[in-house]
Amino acid sequence: MRFIAATGCLALAAGLAGAPASGVGPQERSSTYVVSGSYTYRTYCAGCHGEKGKGDGPLAENLQFLPPDLTQMAKRNGGDYPTSTIRRIVDGREPVEGRGGPDMPVWGDAFKNTETGFDDEQVRLKIASVVDYVRTLQQQ
């Protein structure tokens, strides 16, 4: 019995080691919980938008509408990266007319889970990290 419990603890510890969290449980997380934007993007966005944000992810061809090229967001906005608009699109709970489309998940709801401790501030930080990461993908 002790061996089974120890094995279970090792498996749990191994799972937590691969998690993007800061090493604290959901009940201990505060606004200092750091989320990697690149990790979150690769995990939730790259399947459709592609690894480099070109809209060529492996799932893109199965969608009703092709995902946009995220590397051109600033260029299409006169050279300014539209941070608040991108945040609203990623969040999805305040839809932006003509953006997101029916295939785009409502990440604001999806991210409100045990990983974020069901905390709205943690969801906001996770979305902000993705928005900041997409900013790094911008091309001239």
Image (cartoon, grey):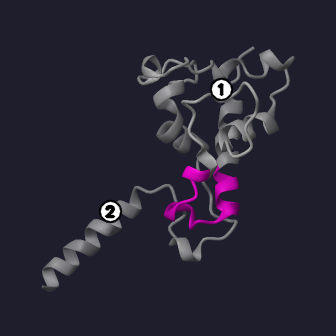
Q: Is residue 26 left or right of residue 73?
A: left
Mark 2 closeness class: few <14, some 14–19, many ≥20 residues within 10 Å:
few
Residue 61 seen anywhere in this rendered image of the structure: yes
Where is mark 2, residue-wise?
14
Q: Earlier in the sequence, mark 2 or mark 1?
A: 2
Dominant secondary structure of the magenta stretch? helix
Residue 51 seen anywhere in this rendered image of the structure: no
128 and 120: which is toward the camera:
120
Q: Position of residue 13 (x, y in %)?
A: 34, 68
Q: Position of residue 48 (x, y in %)?
A: 50, 27
Q: Residue at x 21, y 80 (%)?
A: 5
Q: What amino acid type is highlighted by mark number 1? A: Leu
Where is mark 1, residue-wise?
137
Q: Position of residue 17 (x, y in %)?
A: 40, 61
Q: The magenta stretch spans which residues?
A: 109-126
Residue 58 is covered by the magenta coloring: no
Secondary structure beneath dot 2 equals helix
Q: Residue at x 53, y 71 (%)?
A: 26
Does 120 appear above or below 100?
below
Mark 1 closeness class: few <14, some 14–19, many ≥20 residues within 10 Å:
some
Q: Position of residue 108 (x, y in %)?
A: 63, 50
33 and 49: which is toward the camera:
49
Q: Residue at x 65, y 26 (%)?
A: 137
